[in-house]
Image: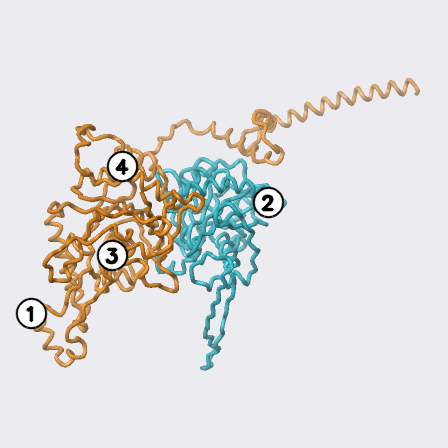
Chain colours: A orange, B cyan
């Protein structure tokens, strides 16, 4: 080639290099220009971004490049925010943790050696319960159950209970309820006299209101509620929102509440004083509705193996209504093989009395009203009396205690119970599980020792 | 719920009362891995459990490339042997809402349900009766129920999934979790199914949304209001429970990318929801 052309070409290349250098410099100056909006410049941003990619070396970096770019920008901006330090708000988690910490501290003055001398502690063996329920596929998580265990211990220490049991958990829309069932020792039930008085007054007021409502329908007397310690009010129930928070005792249930609860279906909100707006109207607030539902669930789903409980011997009892209510553990119980329990429903029996239509466990004859009331009504209703009121209302009879579960009625073509073994692979250590289809969430298990 | 995180996630959802026994958990860990290999899924999710009268169904989802489309559903009785569920048609989805009995536990059981509905034609006094009869096997009913539940109440936190410009939905690897204040708002959670309300929104409302994250329906637009229960269990875990399909639980640990949902229940829609609120 012509050497002159070669020289020119070299010169052009040199000049090209110089122009390339110039172009690079001007582009770098362009990149270093700060943006008018965010005060960042492209050069620093790219440098930081590429450093981040170098450090982290993520997989498929090109796909997440834009997201990483956004993150770097966000991180950059946060450093230049206000110099005032935010007061760290106490999160609800920390507040709850403080309360639950009290569960884990031992009470002052408790001597571990002394505790062994105590006769029978009413505290249930919750870890064992957790283990067996987990095999059945039911559970709240081990840590949660342990916290419940400690909360029950707190309950037992503060209230004189003879027997205590973790009944279960009821879910609500805003918060949940943990329910414990307890039986007070005889004579130790300390429901305040004042509280009872208030209740009676409230009931009286409501009766008056009801009477105004039902002027035309005078044949609806109020069914008296069952006494503490009998029938539907045999056990007391305590609820708390989270284990660690104080236990609140639920009021006793009245038959009117049970009858109303049978007719409505409402979600629980988690606040005990919330009103229940329903049709037909429910006499009471959420605490009463909760108690009524607990009573219904206990009456329908508490079961035990056949023969575990037997009737206590009562001699000379002629009054049928009061007898047959006491059960005691059968000391000769030997245990039924697990496979039998899982297959046939007649090996399980109810051990809580059934609630009659009236709303009580023991039927009360309402025709025996005090005379003062009858007088007023008789004058107004002499003609209608024969048609409305039968001569003597027939006593309501429910299935007696200890009836096998196989005799429960079906609803909507659904058998009320489902039973199965917890494991088919290791059947010698499996447990039998009984699940209720009427009250989803009620489970019973049995294991032969 | 991702099969890899099943171990600790189950503890977080167990507030609803139902969990899996140890044996089932162990069986799931092995069988889901085998499933992943056989069907060549990119992710396997344990969807939940539907209780039947005689036996329960365990359901799993297999995901290939796109997170939302072409999901395969499988069921099993013992967490070891899995069977593929058939895809469902729109007609079957509509029919399944007429069946109100419990699941029996036998996939070959045939449901037969006939319903007569009176239909008034305008001012005519004559009422025409329409007899609707539904016949389906339990397997189809199961597939339709799972699809319905996914379509109506599956939940993911906002930002956990992104939509690429090509239309594919992917896991967002830069998702760091919702903040504590965001986790308390129902609007930070989205339905994980084809959006229905999104297209009806005005431009004013969509101006604030980020199209790669907000391509799904928001939970706060569900009717009736109050069909979700948002709680903070144990103080720091955000748990969402659906009141429309009782048994669906969603959990999310704020400030971490952990989230998941599971359904443990009897597979029946709660038609009485408006009366119960």
- Tell me if mark 2 has few (under 14), some (14-19) or many (20+) residues whose alpha carbon lies within 10 angstroms of its own: some
Which disc is residue A372 wearing? 1
Q: What residue is pinned by disc 3?
A: A402
Q: Chain of mark 2?
A: B
Foreground mark, 1 or 4, reads 4
**Label ID, residue B64:** 2
Residue A348, percent from left and from top: 30, 54
The local crowd at label 1, few if under 14, some if 14 to 19, many if 20 or more residues have their Cα within 10 Å, is few
- Residue B165 image position (x, y, % from top left): 62, 44
Q: Pointers 1 and 4 in contact (CB under 8 A)? A: no
Mark 3–mark 1 distance (CA, rounded to whole Å): 41 Å
B212 with respect to A430 (left or right): right
Q: Earlier in the sequence, mark 4 or mark 3?
A: 4
Please tell me whether mark 3 sits on a helix, a strand or a loop: loop
The front one of A372 and B37 is B37
Q: Mark 2–mark 4 contact, CB under 8 Å?
A: no
Mark seen at residue A150: 4
The residue lying toward the viewer, choosing from B236 and B162, is B236
The chain under label 1 reads A
């Amino acid at each position: 080639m012509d050497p002159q052309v070669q020289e020119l070409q070299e010169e052009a290349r040199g000049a090209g290099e110089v122009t390339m250098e110039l172009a690079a410099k001007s582009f770098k100056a362009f990149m270093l220009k700060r943006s008018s909006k965010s005060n960042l410049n492209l050069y620093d941003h790219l440098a930081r971004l590429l450093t981040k990619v170098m450090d982290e070396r993520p997989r498929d970096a090109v796909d997440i490049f834009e997201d990483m770019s956004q993150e770097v920008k966000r991180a950059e901006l946060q450093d230049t925010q206000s110099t005032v330090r935010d007061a760290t708000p106490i999160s609800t988690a920390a507040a709850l943790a403080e309360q639950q910490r009290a569960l884990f501290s031992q009470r002052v003055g408790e001597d571990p050696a002394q505790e062994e001398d105590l006769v029978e502690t009413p505290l249930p063996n919750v870890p064992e319960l957790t283990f067996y329920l987990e095999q059945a596929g039911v559970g709240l998580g081990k840590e949660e159950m342990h916290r419940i265990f400690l909360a029950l211990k707190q309950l037992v220490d503060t209230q004189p209970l003879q027997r205590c049991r973790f009944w279960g958990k009821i879910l609500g829309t805003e918060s949940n309820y943990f329910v414990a069932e307890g039986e007070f020792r005889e004579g130790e039930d300390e429901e305040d006299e004042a509280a009872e008085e208030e209740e009676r007054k409230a009931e009286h007021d409501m009766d008056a209101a009801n009477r105004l409502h039902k002027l035309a329908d005078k044949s609806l007397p109020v069914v008296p509620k069952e006494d503490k310690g009998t029938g539907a009010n045999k056990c007391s129930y305590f609820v708390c929102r989270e284990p660690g928070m104080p236990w609140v005792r639920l009021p006793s249930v009245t038959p009117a509440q049970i009858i109303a609860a049978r007719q409505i279906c409402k979600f629980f909100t988690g606040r005990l004083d919330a009103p229940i707006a329903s049709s037909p109207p429910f006499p009471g607030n959420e605490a009463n509705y909760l108690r009524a539902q607990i009573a219904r669930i206990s009456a329908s789903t508490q079961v035990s193996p056949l023969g575990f409980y037997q009737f206590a011997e009562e001699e000379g009892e002629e009054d049928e209504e009061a007898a047959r209510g006491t059960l005691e553990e059968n000391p000769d119980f030997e245990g039924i093989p697990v496979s039998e329990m899982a297959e046939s429903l007649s090996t399980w029996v109810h051990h809580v009395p059934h609630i009659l239509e009236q709303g009580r466990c023991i039927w009360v004859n309402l025709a025996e009203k005090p005379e003062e009331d009858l007088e007023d009504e008789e004058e107004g209703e002499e003609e209608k009396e024969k048609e409305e009121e039968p001569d003597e209302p027939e006593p309501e009879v429910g299935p007696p205690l200890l009836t096998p579960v196989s005799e429960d009625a079906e609803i909507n073509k659904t058998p009320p119970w489902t039973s199965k073994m917890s494991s088919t692979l290791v059947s010698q250590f499996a447990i039998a599980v009984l699940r209720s289809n009427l009250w989803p969430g009620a489970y019973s298990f049995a294991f032969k020792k | 719920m991702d099969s890899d995180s099943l171990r600790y996630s189950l503890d977080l959802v167990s507030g609803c009362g139902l969990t899996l026994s140890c044996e089932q958990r162990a069986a799931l860990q092995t069988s889901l891995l085998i499933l992943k290999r056989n069907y060549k899924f990119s992710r396997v999710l344990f969807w939940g459990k539907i209780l039947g009268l005689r036996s329960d169904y365990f359901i799993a989802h297999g995901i290939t490339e796109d997170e939302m489309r072409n999901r395969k559903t499988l069921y099993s009785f013992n967490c070891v042997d899995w069977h593929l569920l058939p895809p469902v048609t729109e007609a079957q989805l509509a029919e399944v809402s007429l069946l109100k009995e419990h699941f029996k536990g036998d996939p070959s059981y045939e449901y037969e349900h006939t319903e007569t509905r009176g239909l008034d034609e305008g001012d005519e006094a004559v009422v025409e009766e329409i007899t609707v009869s539904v016949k389906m096997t339990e397997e189809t009913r199961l597939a339709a129920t799972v699809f319905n539940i996914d379509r109506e109440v599956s939940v993911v936190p906002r930002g956990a999934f992104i939509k690429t410009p090509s239309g594919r939905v992917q896991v967002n690897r830069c998702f760091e979790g919702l903040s504590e204040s965001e986790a308390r708002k129902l609007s930070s959670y989205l339905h994980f199914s084809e959006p229905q309300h999104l297209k009806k929104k005005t431009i004013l409302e969509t101006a604030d949304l980020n199209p790669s994250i907000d391509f799904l329906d928001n939970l706060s637009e569900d009717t009736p209001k109050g069909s979700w229960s948002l709680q903070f269990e144990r103080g720091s875990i955000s748990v969402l429970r659906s009141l429309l399909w009782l048994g669906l639980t969603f959990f999310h640990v704020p400030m971490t990318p952990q989230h998941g949902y599971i359904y443990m229940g009897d597979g029946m829609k709660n038609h009485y929801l408006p009366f119960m609120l």
